[in-house]
């Protein structure tokens, strides 16, 4: 026996809105990159610049300082590491997790040269904070601009 179902346009709009929100969430704030069905963890970064230095913060909660590798060149910062799952899978059942695990690597280009030998790092409360002093020639650089 077939049953008639009443058409509810608001339910269809709600479904469409949830799908669009999901699409834009992934586009605007990408925390993962989908590669052949596997998710790769990519930490969020924040870079601030002033006359003297750059301040870079990277969000890497749940990681230990020894699990991070930081390389600073005069033009960029490369940070890599691996967040491993702390939940062992035992017996029957399973775990549903929205956490992202895996290897990551971020290369962040800098708009000015830095003194990479003077860079400092601090890790506290899941936030890696790097201070990258600018090279002396960059601090004193004066650029003359002519009007045509």
Image (tube, helix red, strand yellow):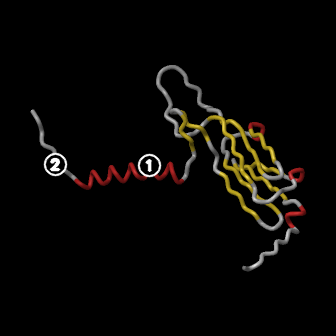
Residue at position x 59%, y 38% in the image: 40
Residue at position x 84%, y 60% in the image: 134
CA neighbours of label 2 inside 10 A, class few (<14), some (14 to 19), many (20+):
few
- Place of residue 117 in the rendered image (x, y in percent of width and height, measured from the top left): 89, 50
- Place of residue 71 in the rendered image (x, y in percent of width and height, measured from the top left): 80, 44
Q: Secondary structure at mark 1?
A: helix
Residue found at the far top of this picture: 91
- Place of residue 92 in the rendered image (x, y in percent of width and height, measured from the top left): 48, 21
Residue at position x 67%, y 49% in the image: 59
Asked if 87 appears above or below 9 in the picture, the reply is above
The disc at residue 33 is none
Relative placement, left or right, of 134 versus 48 is: right
Front tag of 2 and 1: 1
Q: Secondary structure at mark 2?
A: loop
- Place of residue 97 in the rendered image (x, y in percent of width and height, measured from the top left): 52, 36
Tell me the quadrant of the picture where the N terminus can be found: top left
Task: Name the N-terminal-most of marks 2 and 1.
Answer: 2
Relative placement, left or right, of 128 versus 138 is: left
Residue found at the far bottom of this picture: 147
The disc at residue 6 is 2
CA neighbours of label 1 inside 10 A, class few (<14), some (14 to 19), many (20+):
few
The residue indicated by pointer 1 is: 22
């Amino acid at each position: 026996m077939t049953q008639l179902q009443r058409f509810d346009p608001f339910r269809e709009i709600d479904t469409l809105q949830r799908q669009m929100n999901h699409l834009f969430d992934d586009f605007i704030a990408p925390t993962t990159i989908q590669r052949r069905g596997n998710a790769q963890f990519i930490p969020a970064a924040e870079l601030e610049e002033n006359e003297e230095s750059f301040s870079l913060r990277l969000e890497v909660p749940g990681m230990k300082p020894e699990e991070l590798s930081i390389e600073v060149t005069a033009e960029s910062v490369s940070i890599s590491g691996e967040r491993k799952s702390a939940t062992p899978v035992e017996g029957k059942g399973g775990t549903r997790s929205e956490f992202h695990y895996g290897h990551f690597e971020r290369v962040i280009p800098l708009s000015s040269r830095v003194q990479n030998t003077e860079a400092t790092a601090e890790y506290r409360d899941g936030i890696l904070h790097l201070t990258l002093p600018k090279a002396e020639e960059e601090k004193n650089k004066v650029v003359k601009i002519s009007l045509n």
